[in-house]
Every structure is written in C-alpha cells, then in structure tokens.
Amino acid sequence: MSTSKIAFSRRGFIRTSTLASGGILIGFNLFNSCKPNAKPPVDLAQLDYKDFNAFIKIAENGAVTIFSPNPEIGQGVKTAMPMLIAEELDVAWNNVYVVQGDLDTVNYQRQVAGGSQSIRFGWEPLRQTGATARQMLVNAAAARWGVDASECTTHEGVITNAKGETLGYGEVVADAAVLEVPENVSLKDSKDFKIIGTDATNVDMDKIITGKPLFGLDYKTEGMVYASVLRPPAFGQTLESYDDTAARASENVIDIIKFDNKIAVLAKDTWSAMKAKKALVAQWKADEELESTEDHDKILLALLEGNDVDVLRADGDVKKAFAQADKILERTYEAPFLPHNCMEPMNFFAHVTPEKIFLVGPIQTPQGTAAGIAASLGRKPEEVHLKMTRMGGGFGRRLYGDFAVEAATISNISKKPVKVVFSREDDMTDGIYRPASKYKIRASIKDGQITGYHLTEAAINGNMYGLIPNFFPAGAIENYQVDAANYQSKITTGAWRAPYTNFLAFAEQSFFDELADELQIDRVQMRLDLLQKVKGTTDDRIQYSPERLEGVIKMAVEKSGWGNKPDHIYQGFSAYYCHNSHVAEVADVVMENGEPVVKKVTCVIDCGIVVNPLGARNQAEGGVVDGIGHAMYGDFTFKNGVPSSKNFDTYRLIRMKEAPLVETHFIQNNLAPTGLGEPTLPPAGAAVANALKAATGNRFLKQPFTKQYELMNNTKKEILG
Amino acid sequence: MPTYSLNLNGKTQTVDVSEDTPLLWVLRDQLDLVGTKFGCGIGQCGACTVHIDGNAARSCSMPISQLAGKAITTIEGLSHDGSHPVQQAWKEVDVPQCGYCQAGQIMTASAFLAKNASPSSEEIKNAMHGNICRCSAYNRIHKAVEVAADKLV
C-alpha cells in the first residue's frame, strides 16, 4: 500500500481566520501538502495567508465552499479532490460548493498540475485537512457546552453531544476560527466513508450543459484584441521576408507585428484576425534540409540495429541467453507522431503593463509558464498574475506554455490586452507532438522457457524515463535488457497522454501474444507464470505489484468470458501497469461483411479505492476508446517539414460509430488510490491488435492499423468500431 | 459594414459585421454567446452546432448573410435553465469529461430527437457520428441520447 505521508505539521500548513462577512476561512497549501518530499517554501513561523493556495470556507449559515486550485482538464479532479475534504469534514456533498481557485493572484504561484497523480498525492493530506477542520468545529462546540470534545459526534454538518443537544457548523465557526489548530486528528476507517466511493456528478455540469463561459476561449475583457499568428509552415524554416499590405487593408485589422520568426495579426474580432492572416504573404527559408517521415523511418530503424544506445536496465546476460537459445522471436513495432487535438484549440490572454503581467487561460503548468514569461520579458516573477480556466482537453499539450508566451510577447509589443487564438490548422500544424518511435523486441526460448528479453527503443528527441524500463516483464525474466536511442529532430515533441507507455504497451503486449504462440501456451497463463517469478522481489525499482496485476488479469478472464466465447467472437488480451495502476483489457472483434469490427472491450482496473466511481468509469471508458482510436486511425507524417494533416477532414479521430462498448470493473480493495487519467489507454491498442490477429490472421505491428490493413489488402477496406 | 438582423433564441438581434462572417463568430465575439464552441472551422467536428429552423447546423460554416428570416437556436436558448430533456439526460448520465464539445453534442441530439423520438441504437450512432468527443465519452453520449428519448416520450 502506497500512502503519501504529509511531511509537515498541520500547525504550519493549516491556518484559520474569521471572515468579515461572517464564517471561517481555513487555508492550506495544497501544492506542498500533496508533494510528500517537498521542502517548506518559507519559514513556517512566518507563514502568511498568501502562502496558501486552497481554502475551505464555512459560512455562518453552514454552507461549505471549497476553493480548488488545481487545473481541470477533464480528468475530474475538480470534483474528486474536494470529495476527499468533504468526507472528513463530514458535510453533505450536496451542500458543498466547489469553486475553481480565483483568489489573490499571488497565490497562483504554487499550483500543481499532476498527470494521473493528483488523487494519489492528495489522498492523505486532503483528508487530514478536512478532519482537522472538523475537529476544530467540534472543539468549539464542546467548549461552548462545557463538555469533552470526545463525547461529541458529527453528521452532515451538525455536531451532537451526549445529551442529544446539537449545534450546526455555521453556529460555531466564529469560535473555531480562534482555536489552536489540533495536531493529532484521526481519519475515518474506509468502511465509514459516506462520500468517497459514491457517484458524484461533475461539479461544472450545469455550466457545461447550458453553455456558460467556462473555458479559456470564452474569456473576454474590455478592450481586448484578438491575435492570429502566422508561424513557419515547415519545421526548420525561418522567416525571410513578408508583405502585409493586403492584410493591413483587411477589415477590422488593428496592427501587424513581427516577433520571434512569426507574424501576428491583431484585429477587433477572431474572424477578422484569422481572415487577415490568410492575406499575409511570407517567404520562408531553411538553412538545413527539411525532415520527412521517410527519413525518420530509416534513421530510427538504423538506431534499432546500432550500438549507440543507453542501457536503461540490464539483468543477467542477454547476449549469452540469445547465443544459447533454441529459438529467437524478434519483432519491430512502429508508431507515428501524433497531434493532441484538444477540442479547444490553444489560446491564451495576456495584458502586459508597466505595473504587471496579467494572464488568463487554459494551462496545465501555471507556475512554470508564469516564471518563463517573467524571464522572457525581463520582469520579476511576482509581477506575473495568472488565472486559470477550465480546459477543453489537455492530453499533455497544455503542459507547454508556448501559446501563453506568444500572447505575452504580442501584448508586450502592442501594449494591448491580447488574446491569441489558434485556428484548428495552427493547432494541428504547430504542435508539440507525441514523438514517432519504434521498438525492437527479441526473446530467446530455451527448453520451452523464455530465457532472455531484449527491448530497444528508438524515438524522436527523447527516450522513456523514470521507472518505465522496470515495468512488467522486468523482474520476471532472468536475462533482461532495455536499451534506448534517439534522434534529435526540429519537429517539436512532448508528452502525449501516457507518454511512451501509450505505444510501449502496444509493442510488448502484442509481442506477448506471439511469444505465447511460440511457446504453445495459453497467453493468459504465460503472463501469470511470469508474474509468479516476480512475487517477493526485493528490487525496489519494480513498483508494479505482481499480485495486483494477477488480480486484474484473473478478473478480466472472468468478466470477459475469455476462452468461452462463441466461435464468431475473436478476443484479444492485454494487461499493463503504468501510472501506479494495474489494468487488464479484453477486446471482442467480430467479422461483419468480411470486415473486422471491434464490438466491446472489457476493462478491469486496480487503482485502489475509487473516490468517485461515476467519474472514474468515464475516465476508464474514455481512455480505452481514445487508445483504440489512435491505434486504428492516428496517422501523422511529415514531408519536408510540413505535417500531412491540418484539420479533421484529413486527420481522423475516432467517432461514435467506431467506438466499442466499454465494460469497466474495478478491483474492490482498501488500498490508497492511484492514477486513472492515463492507465486504461496503453493496453487498449494491443487488446485490439491481438483480437484482430485472431479474427483476420493479420498481425498488426505498425500504427495506425487502418493504413497497414489497406496496404495488406490493397483496398480501401477498413477496420470499423 | 452591413447590418444584419437575426432571429436568435426567440429575440431579434442586430449586428454590424462583414457578410462572410460565420454565425459562430457573430455569436461568440459580437453577442457574447460563448456556449457555441469553435473546434475546426470547417464543419467537421460539430462543436459549433446550433439549430437553424429546427435543424442541426454547423455555425462555423454558415455566413451571416445567409441567415435572413431563419430561426436560430443556440445552447443558451435550448432552455432557460438547463431543463431541456436532453440537457437533463446529459446531467443524469454525467456525460462530460472536459466538457468542451458537449454543447454541440446536445444541440445535435436535441434536433435529432425532435424528429425521431424513439430511435434505434443504430440511428443514434448515425445521428451523433458527426460530433467528435476528443475525450471519447461516446458510450455515455449514446446512453444519454437514449435517456433523453425516454424523457421525451
């Protein structure tokens, strides 16, 4: 069980004060309390309200407001994190209002956007915060009654003493605010949870379904102008010259500004800015040869065969194992670049004045972005005020603040409040893409056993990081090695939902299918046998649990009817650990009119306690369908530095008719919660590929599958959902 | 710039914009109705879906000059308080993840159900196929259309 341990005393990190409007404000530093190894940012004795970034407000009428400072990108933390506080505070969830933190902007300097980590790290400190607040309210009530606090109980915001007298939280907040913060509060036993583990609707639901302003693109302020930016059409080009005569003559255009190898058109409205941008005439040049996917393919394949690699993990002696093998299985798996394609195109608002830099918009990394802008404009970090909005998708793209830097730069030059808006074409062609990558996997077989496993990664710009080389099957095979090499490209790349594992899981779990065939053993049994060998490991780099992976595999077998399906249903199996969670998936494929159709995916997850099952199932279903969609259709190549697609007419995303039914099951246990925004995506591609092999006889080694299928059959036929 | 009179959400609205301005940007930038979303600008994703004379239409590809005399409904006008059966179904099923595409999904679904109140699963899939949900909440969108259909019967 991995629980995060709060590193500081609550005395320092929780503060209370009475509000002029009545009621109590309880402040705590979410960023630091959720980072177990973080160092205190300031002298605890000097800690002031500005050092807190999350607050609970309890009004005299008993209403509870939780100000959540965390970026919400659709992963549901704005709902789930306050649930943890409300549970221990012991209030009715229906009476809790959740507000996206919009406080003194100084507080925005310590915020966190955690990829699949928010709930994992927030689990203990958020509950402790709620419990501490509850204890203070109880202490205040006990003092007023003249009784011992231990004889008081709470239920949904009401405190009751042994005589049956009651006081509402709102009635004692003024007293509680001046009490000392208690140090030793106990947390509820999981069997007593009333909010955690129950379905809670998305807290922004009413605004979403009625179309209220919520997202960055919806932000508007007095005097704001709109900027549409012309960027180099090919990666590797620079601006040589341009003629803006026609663009300046276009309606509603305010100004045209050249900056950083780009040209911004400022106009009174979005449409006028976008239209005028099309009238710009620019000449671009390239000092070096521009890159194409054809070249990348050759380079990456050569890297897989070369010796210029970093060894990321090496157990035993793979060379010897391969030299002594009866048989060697070798496969190469290939993945393209992928754009993120958030439905809300990149955008940001900036107003740079001599006094301050005011920024508003959708960003996963407010702290780093604000600091970067301060540095680039030669300003002090404390002059930057950044306000976050809800995000129309993130998927990793909004970790990068390039669009916010553009907005600040343009505002700094023009001295105007500016909103930069990407068109879809800008968004898709000026991306920070999932890097193209290839994996070569080799396994040696001796006397019917897997004796060696050697995986080599060749990727654009960077390689797998952290503990990824130690994921399953690391620890299960005596002679085991992971090597990595990369090629530095001018094409910008970065994190894309489940970085690296989004394709690594496909490669390995597809390879396991073929390996089981070679060994003539049941593919599920093969995984279970390997996991047996990891049990009791003392290797602390191995953080997956063989027992928990075994648990999801066994439940997936049971729930999917693995091995017991009628002949016309072809199943594919996949199981993977990443982002601290364990997932197994089974895809069901049927042939309809001679074409394979993915009908259903059974998904079993062990992510510990599920805080909000309603939101969790949504994440799981979305992750599976997203994984399948990109594996089947995601096709993004470059020709002389220019992306192959600019918009959704040529770039295909999965749609309603292709989306299979996803049946989700959670392992029930009392272990601390782990990530859910990403872990259901990586196994999905291999579950489908393995089912497609069973259905069609074709082994898919390259994504997207549709492209390979068309080539195999020399037809326009395709795989449908 | 020419002046256009719009029949929008049951009221008459007047705007001064160039004739090729898409309805989407008139709604968002001129009239502050930002519920209708910008997704692709070429009618491929459905985020900007509104009703024109009761039919689902892509406002990003609809020049303002072609809307004379037509009744336009946006997500803000579907109901005053989110009480339309499709909005209620979306809430009951807890459809949204990021939520950005959902106004467009709701507008497509409500126009579809107005013409076919008891659709088959296949008909729902065909009707909703033009709207992309990048979070891939398709299972729930499908379910919510079914729930809405039950409410409308």
Image (tube, helix red, strand yellow):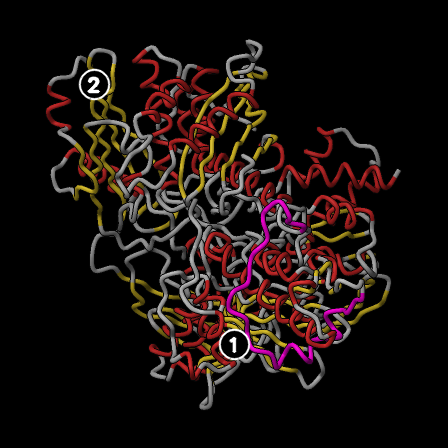
The residue closer to the viewer here, A695 or A531, is A531
Residue under numbered circle 2: A328
Q: Is residue B99 above or below residue A160?
A: above
Q: Give the label on residue A418, or none.
A: 1
Q: Residue at x 71, y 66 (%)?
A: B33
Secondary-structure class at tag 1:
strand
Q: Chain of mark 1?
A: A
Q: Residue at x 41, y 31 (%)?
A: A547
The magenta span reads A165-194
Q: Is residue B29 left or right of residue A716?
A: right
Residue B10 position within the rendered picture, expressed as x and y whole percent measured from the top left: 86, 62
Residue A47 position within the rendered picture, expressed as x and y whole percent measured from the top left: 45, 81
Q: Is residue B79 left or right of residue B106?
A: right
The residue closer to the viewer here, A89 or A418, is A89
Q: Residue A77 sits in which quadrant?
A: bottom right
Query: Which residue occupies the extreme bottom position in the image?
Result: A354
Q: Residue A381 sits in which quadrant?
A: bottom left
Q: Residue at x 72, y 77 (%)?
A: A144
How dense is the environment of label 1, judged by Cα within 10 Å: few (below 14), some, or many (20 and up)?
many
Q: Is residue A693 left or right of residue B44?
A: left
Mark 2, mark 1: which one is toward the viewer? 2
Mark earlier in primary sequence (2, 1): 2
How dense is the environment of label 2, judged by Cα within 10 Å: few (below 14), some, or many (20 and up)?
some
In magenta stretch: residue A192: yes
